[in-house]
Image (cartoon, helix red, strand yellow):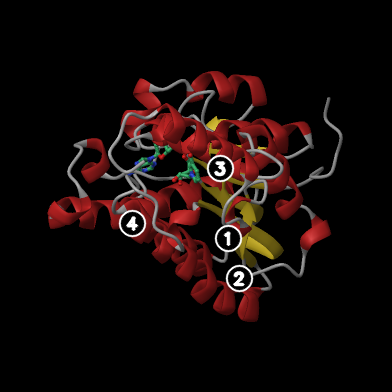
Amino acid sequence: MREGLLQGKKGIIFGALNEKSIAWQVALKTWQQGAELVLTNSPVAVRMGTINDLAKLTGSKVITADATKMDEIDNLLSESMTVFGGKFDFILHAIGMSPNVRKDIPYEQTSYDNMLKTLDISALSFHRILQTAYKLDALKEWGSVVALSYVAAQRTLTGYNDMGDAKALLESIARSFGYIYGRDKKVRINTVSQSPTATTAGSGIHGFDSLIDFAERMSPLGNASAEECADYCVALFSDLTRKVTMQNLFHDGGFSSMGMSLRAIEQYKKSFDECDCDEK
Ligand SMILES: NC(=O)c1ccc[n+]([C@@H]2O[C@H](COP(=O)([O-])OP(=O)(O)OC[C@H]3O[C@@H](n4cnc5c(N)ncnc54)[C@H](O)[C@@H]3O)[C@@H](O)[C@H]2O)c1
């Protein structure tokens, strides 16, 4: 049912690869709330994934763009303005990839070529999109831009590798551009720091199953799902959050404010009791 919190709004959703993608859920929920969408992903992801099914379901146009290529971003935003008949209201950046994570190269032995690619794809792409939108004056006043982040921007989590550095940069770009875009065009820019979520990108992280279990035990409200993240994004794209900008907003069931929880310590104690190790 199309309920209407985003009735009349138009936006671009980056990063829907398949139905596990957080961006997929954001596209569905924003569409259900009345928004008109353009969906985009890299050419290879459009070929390998199922974004065209999502486009059919939501009546959206798919425009391919590699988020590391300025000309492709420029073309995407210009074409989207033609599709929408002018300026539009919101953008979701849900792009992340680390060749170091993919190739299982540990942080302390990083390949700098790979690291540059991680930063380029996962963080500088956000600057590129914002710079292009600003240049084309593509977003309406009180427009809203959201990028998805993770708590590894602030705290070290084993296995997250150079994606922690990329997320720190992503959050900083939201603040730096948020000032300029807010001052000049009244556009708000925020990052949402989401719980670990079982998606294609998420599952690539070393020890992901244990990480998701640990976060679930540590979070008083439990991990936030992709659908719940999409609900939060709807709120941030709506007119109900017009003065929220330059923030990193935790959407993680309380994980980021915890030190140790009863559920986590009980699990730790159980493993310790069952362990045949010298430290006991
Ligand atoms: N899954 C998690 O645990 C989790 C937690 C917090 C934040 N996030 C963030 O959420 C966002 C979405 O990831 P997801 O978990 O839904 O996984 P996903 O694999 O479904 O999405 C990642 C997307 O990035 C796209 N991408 C990669 N390189 C690209 C390029 N050069 N140009 C354009 N697009 C490109 C992929 O095609 C894919 O659609 C990412 O920024 C990720 O870091 C994920």
Residue located 60% across and 70% down the image: 246
Amino acid on which the number 4 mark rests in the picture: Met
Number of labels in the image equals 4
* Local SS, label 1: loop
State whether residue 214 is above or below residue 9.
above
Which numbered disc covers residue 266? Answer: none
Looking at the rendered structure, the kind of residue marked 2 is: Met
Cα distance, mark 3 to mark 1? 50 Å
120 or 78, nearer to the observer: 120
Q: Quadrant of the N terminus?
A: top right
Q: Position of residue 115 (x, y in %)?
A: 22, 55
Rendered image: mark on residue 70: 4
The residue type indicated by label 1 comes to Ala
Q: Are marks 3 and 4 in contact (CB under 8 Å)?
A: no
Q: What residue lies at 86% left-to-right and 34% top-to-bottom?
A: 3
The mark nearer the N terminus, 4 or 2, is: 4
The answer to whether residue 21 is above or below residue 251 is above
